[in-house]
Amino acid sequence: MTSEPVILVGTHAGVRTLTLNRPDKLNAANDALLLTLTDELRAAEGEPGVRVVVITGAGRGFCAGQDLADVSGRDMTFTEHLNHTYNPLIRTLRGLGKPVITAVNGVAAGAGASLALAGDIRLWTQSARLIEVFSNIALVPDSGSTWFLPRLVGYHRAFELMALAERVDAEQGRALGLCEHVYPDETFREDVQAYAERLAARPAHALKLTKQALNAALTGTLGEALDREAELQQLAGDHWEHEEGVTAFKVKRVPQFMREPSASGDQPSARER
Ligand code: T3D
């Protein structure tokens, strides 16, 4: 008997979709799921034809956090486990040189909520729910929730959501800035794919540098951000994408940032200084 893969992998029009696939448990995370998801993100980084990554869930849940059936008898401490599984996942996602969309198709709880918040773009379906559920089992929010949530909603609201494990529905999630867009359940997959394809048509190298700059700026000073922008702007300005964007503007056409994988790497522009 062959067991179902814990992560389903599909690619269409430059969009790599990674689907958490333990629907009977609302995609609660076991080690296989966490390690495979991290490996798949790393693999996507190395494939020039993949321009955007989408993480979503199979069935009615996005991710219910740690699989609680998988904890007893574990031969790792909590600290070791987080450092082995969740932390590399979140670091890889945020450090990936490609945009990652978390497409929250249902409940996102515990570390699943952290994963949902970690996306560069967060798209929710109407029936999505986010719950910082950790305190229900007397644990501390992890996998980045203590970093993401207060930056989005402020310290006090973050503490309340964590202390009371309150459910945030899609309407509240949008109002609080936990997601960029909410789509109807019926058309969610198509809406996510269409959004991802829009992103895939944008200049990949410039977005990689933008992601790098924004992530670094979140923890630095204005002076550091200005210095970094000046350095990264040189890399962007020397790249063929910039030339294409400027040429397209001048001749009044739509810029073509998607080239064949062999030609869309990080190669310098023809007018390299
Ligand atoms: O270990 C470490 O290294 C520390 C790391 C911790 C990270 C964490 O994520 S801690 C938080 C762990 N997650 C939870 O505590 C969430 C537990 N689940 C729930 O509170 C609820 O299931 C939900 C609020 C997420 C959804 O509720 P509902 O009513 O929509 O669904 P349900 O009926 O509770 O769940 C459906 C099934 O999924 C059910 O199985 P059954 O009865 O149909 O066979 C349920 O047991 C299963 N399920 C849901 N969440 C988990 C789970 N099974 C294992 N682990 C889960 N986390």
Image: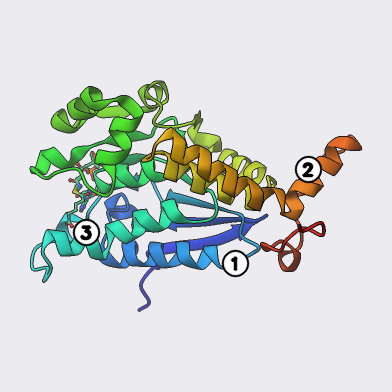
Tag 3, which secondary structure?
helix
- Seen in the image, is 27 located left or right of residue 189? left
Q: Does any atom of ligand 1 lie closer than 8 Å to the CB of label 3?
A: yes
Q: Nearer the viewer, residue 11 or 231?
A: 231
Separation of residues labelled 1 and 2 (CA atoms): 23 Å
At label 1, the amino acid type is Glu
Q: Nearer the viewer, residue 25 or 216?
A: 216
- Residue 247 rendering spot, x and y as whole percentages: 86, 43
Q: Which of the marked residues, 3 or 1, is nearer the chain's N terminus?
A: 1
Q: Which of the marked residues, 1 or 2, is nearer the chain's N terminus?
A: 1
Within-10-Å neighbours for mark 3: few <14, some 14–19, many 20+: some
- Vertical arrangement, residue 147 with respect to residue 68, above or below: above
Residue sitting at x 24%, y 29%: 158
* Residue indicated by mark 3: 82
Residue sitting at x 59%, y 67%: 47
* Residue indicated by mark 1: 47
Separation of residues labelled 3 and 2 (CA atoms): 43 Å
At label 3, the amino acid type is Leu
Tag 1, which secondary structure?
loop
Tag 2, which secondary structure?
helix
* Residue indicated by mark 2: 245
Q: Which of the marked residues, 3 or 2, is nearer the chain's N terminus?
A: 3
Residue sitting at x 33%, y 61%: 88
Marks 3 and 1: CB-CB under 8 Å? no
The quadrant of the rendering that contains the C terminus is bottom right
- Residue lying at the far bottom in this picture: please name it: 1
At label 2, the amino acid type is Gly
- Residue 147 rendering spot, x and y as whole percentages: 29, 40
